[in-house]
Amino acid sequence: FGIPMMGESSMQSLINVHFRTNDGLSKLLMRRSSRCDDRAMLHFTYNSQLVGAFVCHDGNEGEWVLQVPFFPPFQTMVDFDTEKVRGMIWAGLLGAKPKNEGRRGPDDDNLDFEILSIRPWTMSSLVAQRYLNEYRNVVLVGDAAHSFPPAGGFGMNTGLQDAHNIAWRLALLLNREKKNELWEDAHLVDENAEWPPSGPT
């Protein structure tokens, strides 16, 4: 729609590794965390083999994501081939790669995992200069209007705020109340506005 974005388009490059642990490894990891009443979702690892963050989407089913800092052009995807990434995951989960990846665990199950994908992505922090296009018939919301680093869930929360914001404005427009003043007052077309308000006061 030709609406420029403001902010930083490349804050940090990372490698996203989606992997699934088998039953034996899932049980071992869940047993280790069962001492706590509330099992953690984020696990940050700093050791000689890995600096990264594990995101546990479903520990019982073995759904995990590993985020590893990536520094192009000094690094390429060749530095993150399957064998190297497997070593990183073992270093993060168990402290070191086991001598035999098929070794028996406490429940006599093999400890293993399957790498589903290894992909690079770029963290950004951007917001649209305005939310309303020049023809005044398209309003940006969610990811089309802004991009955040994933920590904190701000992208999801602001997307919901955008939806709430546009919903009450459209309701007023459909009722033909203050049609023109509504958009201008909301800073939706003001290029100098730092941020559109999230709702009526």
Image: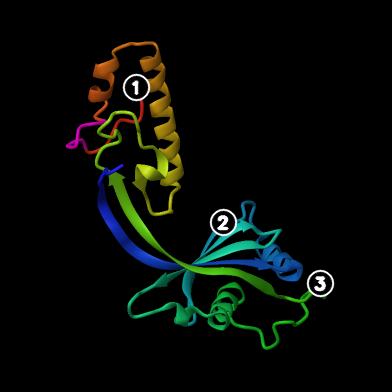
Considering the whole magenta stretch, tell me its main secondary structure: loop
Residue at the (71%, 58%) spot, across then down: 60
SS for callout 1: loop
Instruction: Identify which amino acid the numbered label 2 is placed on.
Output: Met
What span is colored magenta in the figure?
A: 188-193
Instruction: Identify which amino acid the numbered label 1 is placed on.
Output: Pro
Q: For marks 2 and 3, give the CA distance.
A: 24 Å
For label 2, the residue is 41
Q: For marks 3 and 1, give the CA distance.
A: 57 Å
Residue at the (25%, 18%) spot, across then down: 180
Instruction: Please say whether residue 92 is one of the residues in the magenta stretch.
Output: no
Query: Residue 107 has which mark?
Result: 3
Which of the colour schemes (rainbow, by chain, secondary structure, one colour) is used? rainbow
Instruction: Identify which amino acid the numbered label 3 is placed on.
Output: Asp
- Few, some or many residues within 10 Å of mark 2 (<14, 14–19, 20+): few
Relative side of 100 to 179, left or right: right
Classify residue 23 by image quadrant: bottom right
